[in-house]
Image (spheres, rainbow, N blue to C red):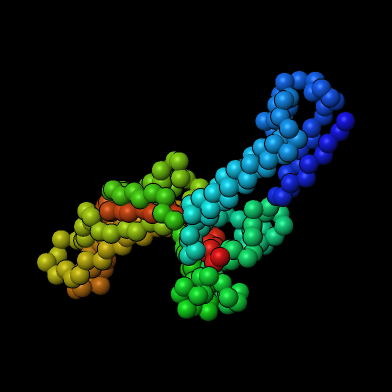
């Protein structure tokens, strides 16, 4: 005969047998010499035990879940993160940290008394420092050669300052005036030179090359977008 037992919690057990039972034990813990009512009770006990364990698992998962107010960074922009393309996204639990109005009655709103999501858009617009270099550059040196090779494609900003630059006179007259120093980049090369004005004759000396201190900073635009857990 075929006996179907339907139990609460979507558990269904099927016992297949013909009197006498074909085997000494069937699924669900029932034995061949067990009365039908005892078998049903055994299966019910197993189902209850499984249900209790499952409930405990759900409780523990909830306890260990990321707490409300947690902020995560993702390389997915909102039009992808918030769409069906992202199977793990749940709009009832995560929203962009963009300072906009929160969904009504969120746990985050109840806990913080804030009607708006935190605004972390400035973090998405910031630049991340990849490398910093410094040293001495000579006049005429190619600036790109000052970059570290592994970050050569990054956005580099160089800063230069005086190091060893001297004025240069047009002659040996006593009457000399101010020294003029220049440190800059021209056509991708370092310019570091100086000259001196003879005020009596209004004549500048030729530019004399020198060296400069430099510092270079390599940065890249932040690839991250920020989202906050609200439920």
Q: Residue at x 79, y 32 (%)?
A: 15
Q: Give the image location of residue 209, x and y in percent.
A: 29, 53
Left or right position of 178 against 86: left
176 or 57, which is in the foreground?
57
The answer to whether one can see residue 142 in this image is: no
Quadrant of the rendered structure where residue 48 is? top right
**Quadrant hosting residue 2:** top right
Quarter of the image that includes the C terminus: bottom right
Tell me what residue is drawn at x 22 percent, y 66 percent: 179
Q: Is residue 218 above or below residue 114?
A: above
Q: Residue at horizontal 64%, vertical 60%?
A: 90
Left or right: 197, with 190 as reference point: left
Question: Which residue is at a point 48% across and 65% down the rendered structure image?
Answer: 69
**Is 129 above or below relative to 40?**
below
- Name the spot of residue 219 as percent of width and height, x first: 44, 55
Relative image position of residue 133 (x, y in whole percent): 34, 48
- Please identify the residue farthest to the right as the structure is shown: 1
| Left or right: 42, with 231 as reference point | right
Asked whether residue 230 is in view, the answer is yes
């Amino acid at each position: 005969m075929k006996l179907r037992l339907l139990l609460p919690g979507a558990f269904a057990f099927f016992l297949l047998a013909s009197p006498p039972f074909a085997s000494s034990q069937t699924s669900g813990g029932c034995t061949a010499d067990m009365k039908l009512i005892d078998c049903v009770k055994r299966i019910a006990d197993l189902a209850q035990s499984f249900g209790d364990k499952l409930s405990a698992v759900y409780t523990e998962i909830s306890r260990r879940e990321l707490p409300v107010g947690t902020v995560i960074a993702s390389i997915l922009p909102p039009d992808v993160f918030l769409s069906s393309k992202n199977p793990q996204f749940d709009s009832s639990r995560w929203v962009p940290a963009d300072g906009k109005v929160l969904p009504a009655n969120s746990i985050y709103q109840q806990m913080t008394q804030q009607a708006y999501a935190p605004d972390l858009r400035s973090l998405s617009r910031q630049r991340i420092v990849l490398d910093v270099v410094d040293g001495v550059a000579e006049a005429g040196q190619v600036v790109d050669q000052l970059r570290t090779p592994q970050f050569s494609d990054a956005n580099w900003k160089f800063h230069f300052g005086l190091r060893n630059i001297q004025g240069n006179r047009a002659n040996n007259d006593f009457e000399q005036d101010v020294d003029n120093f220049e440190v800059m980049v021209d056509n991708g090369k370092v310019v570091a030179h100086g000259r001196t004005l003879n005020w009596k004759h209004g004549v500048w000396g030729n530019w004399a090359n020198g060296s400069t201190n430099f510092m270079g900073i390599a940065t890249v635009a932040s690839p991250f977008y920020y989202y906050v857990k609200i439920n």
